[in-house]
Amino acid sequence: MSNPGFETQAIHAGQSPDPTTGAVVPPIYQVSTYKQDGVGGTRGGHDYSRSINPTRTALEECLATLEGGARAMAFASGMAACDTLLRSVLAPGDHVIIPNDAYGGSYRLFKRVLERWGVRHTPVALGDLAAVTSALEPGVTKLVWIETPTNPLLAIADISAVAALAHAAGALVAVDNTFASPYLQQPLALGADVVVHSTTKYLGGHSDVVGGALVAKTEELGEILAFHHNAMGAIAGPFDSWLVLRGIRTLALRVERHCDNAEKIVDFLSAHPRVATVLYPGLSTHHNHDVASRQMKRFGGMISFLIDGNTDDAISVCNRASLFTLGESLGGVESLIELPAAMTHASVTGSQLEVPANLIRLSVGIETVEDLLDDLVVALG
């Protein structure tokens, strides 16, 4: 087919029927090494599974296709993907721009690992293009790290505009596309150089696997990342690769339901007297709603809101929820609730990235939405 749709690619890209048996699902090649036909006589380059594994290759080909990239690499976790990318393209003395509301785990990597290695970072409100321009150090800033929507404040960055500024200053652009998934947002088509994923989240979709991925826009960058992927070794195992690939097959269907449910919950929260503020890019009152409307297909299944009260009030809401499971992570079929300041973003406490203590984050699942609303009625009291 000349121009297959997203759903078709999600099911078929990298996933041709097995040539030996005709199996329509790629096999799990649970193997560490491969027989060679004479010294150096590998079959299709298969020598050792850290370097190449057919199940992982299937996932990587699918990810590259869905993101519109030249090459993808699958990792053991999202943070392994981040670490490999950063150590591939940065060196001591370099400077990075990050969101001023970045994910806590990413901030920890920049602050407590890369800073000791001599890489500086500047937190910036990436929705403010003047602030981005001011923070860029041409020739020294080597990377602009974008999260859009951000975790947990759901801020939106204009990928095309930030990429233009970054490239003019000689910097690469990486976009963490975990919250949106390739179904809702295509950062490479908008000017990014590389996409980052925690495949644990929407791509896997079932809270049963931990993984990460990088997708490079060009073969040149892909070769650099692939070398470090193999040299540093934080690769996705075959079973984990298979689980993520299994999840991707229903990504479009699941994300549509996540979005449907989230929109109804946003309406409910916006009208509730105990909710002070709802953070969701789909709201016309969102600071960068117009940008989100332009670069996203829909607005996703993540919602954050500020309770009208203090930390104890927010904790009580989390504890009273029952269908919304109290837990970290996101993007699974089940709904989750959490208090970022004490859970996913505890590592940014006391920093410029500290989040409000009365902020609650929801990962809206695909359950019957009326049941989710009933649970929130009880939780909010």
Image: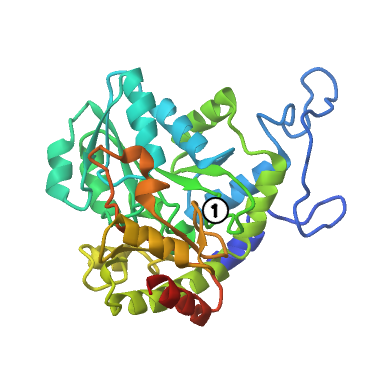
Residue 51: x and y in percent read: 65, 29
**Quadrant where the C terminus is found in the figure:** bottom left
**Quadrant where the N terminus is found in the figure:** bottom right
Q: Residue at x 24, y 40 (%)?
A: 166
Q: Nearer the viewer, residue 188 or 120?
A: 120
Q: Nearer the viewer, residue 292 or 169?
A: 292
The image shows residue 341, relative to residue 237, as above or below, that is below
Q: Secondary structure at mark 1?
A: helix
Q: Residue at x 30, y 68 (%)?
A: 293
Q: Which residue is mark 1?
A: 65
Q: Amino acid at mark 1?
A: Thr
The image shows residue 285, relative to residue 80, as above or below, that is below
Residue 193 shows in this picture: no
The image shows residue 58, relative to residue 266, as above or below, that is above
Q: Is residue 192 left or right of residue 183?
A: left
In the rendered image, the residue lying farthest to the right is 21
Q: Nearer the viewer, residue 361 or 218?
A: 361
Residue 25: x and y in percent read: 76, 57
Q: Nearer the viewer, residue 190 or 332?
A: 332
Q: Residue at x 26, y 63 (%)?
A: 309
Residue 222 shows in this picture: yes
- How busy is the neighbourhood of tag 1: few (under 14 within 10 Å), some, or many (20 plus)? many
Q: Residue at x 55, y 30 (%)?
A: 229
The image shows residue 141, relative to residue 174, as above or below, that is above
| Count of residue discs | 1
Residue 102: x and y in percent read: 32, 45
